[in-house]
Image (cartoon, rainbow, N blue to C red):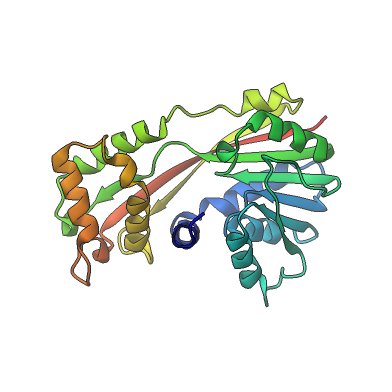
Amino acid sequence: MHRGLTESLAELLDLDAAVLGSYLGEATLWASALAAAPPRTVVDLGAGTGVGAFALAARFPSADVVALDRTATMLRRIEDTARGTASSDRVRTLEADVDVAWPALGPVDLVWSSSALHEVADPGRVLDDVRTALRPGGLVVILESAGPARFAFGPAAGLEPAFAARLRDAERTLRGDAEVDWGLPLAEVGLPLVDRRTFTATARPGSPGVGRYVRLYLERIRSGLQERLGAPDLATLDALLAARGADAPLSSGDVTIRTTRTAWAARRP
């Protein structure tokens, strides 16, 4: 991946946690309640910048957490963050591409995958590898976003109210959004579903990082919207992104963001 793109994605992931990460505490608590026993080894599959790994380390203070990702830049970011933290001796990184092979980790108690499994080439094979890696009674938790983020721009943005809805519809066609029910693929590899939950997170206008998050998010999807937004809306989007400085619409942070994550938990018999 291009260095600039990697750094931009890393910043977006960190902002996602800062702006919309309130669901993580609830989700890890849910996973803790479902675990047959306190996990000793936890794998964060597709760890990104490590937000999930650190949340898991906080929730499971007796566990060793492996932040697994195929991108070395992301893993270095996790290592930098871990230095000097209370969990630095329990969070370690591992560079591996699960599309090639599952790494030699030994038995694990919990595999956590947040917004990552849809990126692999063969999810069924990866889930089969996860089943093999789990100890009997071990848990796998999959979290995926349930559709694009919802933006509601306030008066300071000076945008037509329906613009945000059309933007979301265009992104939905870009993503081909038909939510995957991961319960079926899990069951097909011998990991029966034990629970399914929906978690929501909302960032209010003026929250730290809101404007920057929206800018990075829209910049990331802009090229894909070229053929999916009408010309007037595309021009509005480009003007929104081009405006800089303290008086720019996005600088005001006058936007509400709402996201929904669906979570599936399955246990190895």
Apparent side of residue 229 relative to residue 158 in the rendered image (left or right): right
Q: Where is residue 15 in the image (x, y as percent from the top left)?
A: 45, 61
From this view, report whether residue 10 is shown above or below residue 144. below
Examine the image and state in which quarter residue 157 appears: bottom left
Tell me what residue is drawn at x 72 percent, y 44 percent: 111
In-front residue for pair 150/67: 67
From this view, report whether residue 252 is shown above or below residue 218. below
Residue occupying the far bottom of the picture = 84
Q: Position of residue 150 (x, y in %)?
A: 34, 44
Tell me what residue is drawn at x 63 percent, y 23 percent: 184
Tell me what residue is drawn at x 21 percent, y 60 percent: 242
Apparent side of residue 58 relative to residue 223 in the rendered image (left or right): right
From this view, report whether residue 157 is shown above or below residue 100. below
Residue occupying the far front of the picture = 2
Tell me what residue is drawn at x 35 percent, y 62 percent: 212
Quadrant where the C terminus sits is top right
In-front residue for pair 103/269: 103
Examine the image and state in which quarter residue 140 appears: top right
Examine the image and state in which quarter residue 191 appears: top right
In-front residue for pair 112/262: 112
Q: Position of residue 131 (x, y in %)?
A: 78, 34
